[in-house]
Image: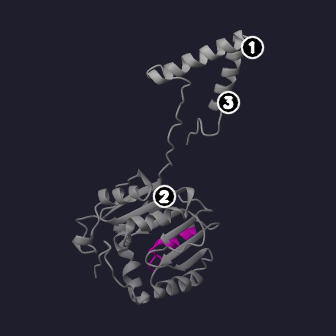
Amino acid sequence: MDGDDGAFHHRFEGAETWAKEFDAAERDAWQKPHEVLEALKIGKSATVADIGAGTGYFATRIARLAPQGRVYAVDVEPDMTRYLGERATREGLSNLIPVLAQGDNAALPESVDLALLVDTFHHIGHRTAYFTRLKSLLKDDGRLAIIDFKADSPDEPPPQYRIPPEQAVKELAAAGFTLVEQPSFLPRQYMLVFRKSAPSFAPPQQRSIASPNTASSGATAEKSVTQDRNFMSSGGPKTSAKGRCDAMTNRTHSRSLSPSAGWSR
């Protein structure tokens, strides 16, 4: 079913039935799980979220790659999370943790090093808002990996719901992500790897003491000089010209070292 949120909505009830398709041995030939995980360079202590984990095709593999880490197998179908919990127990994967999510919220219990979505991007509605929220659940150096079907793939979804990689990049840029890798070894799918976009800071504005281009500033400067001369000639404090220069230099130096100046990321 379709919706007005840009997503292809499809229920995946009956996990045992879906497992026969999702975990079929012949899937390996085109899904290339070993190559995918090798490209993602997942460390042994990594914290990973497999969003749209289904019956655990990738989640179980990641759990074995990261035995000192945690793998959150996220799905919106209660029957899938039930199946994932049973599979984790059956296969001795104590670091695989099922998470029942909501359609607009991954419901992760902590920040992760990597969020992986395989054949799930087209099922998510209001994607810019969704991934803006998800960005806050990535660590500062965390990554987001999207794998989804190409236009000519023989698999689901229907052609009108296949999202071109260029559109995915544009939507994720709006959510605050920057594309950093685009591996091309998958025959039926594209693969995009993102990082959080670096925050941008406006350069500090430099203030001049007097602008020579305006009549008013020139008049102000001359008035100041005249007052200074009158003050000196009338017996005011006899501050030397060198002392006045030093004072101005010190004031300018203190401004240039203020916390807002020179920030770089």
Give the extent of the magenta segment: 51-64
- Residue ID for mark 1: 239
Q: Is residue 52 magenta?
A: yes
Residue 57: name its quadrant: bottom left
Q: Could you tell me the amino acid type at mark 2?
A: Leu
* Element class at badge 1: loop
- Residue ID for mark 2: 40
Q: Quadrant of the C terminus?
A: top right
Q: CA distance from mark 1 to mark 2?
A: 68 Å
Tell me where residue 60 appears, x and y as whole percent: 52, 74
* Element class at badge 2: helix
**Lower sequence index among marks 2 and 3:** 2
Q: Residue at x 63, y 17 (%)?
A: 227
* Element class at badge 3: helix
Q: Residue at x 31, y 76 (%)?
A: 8
Q: Residue at x 49, y 46 (%)?
A: 200
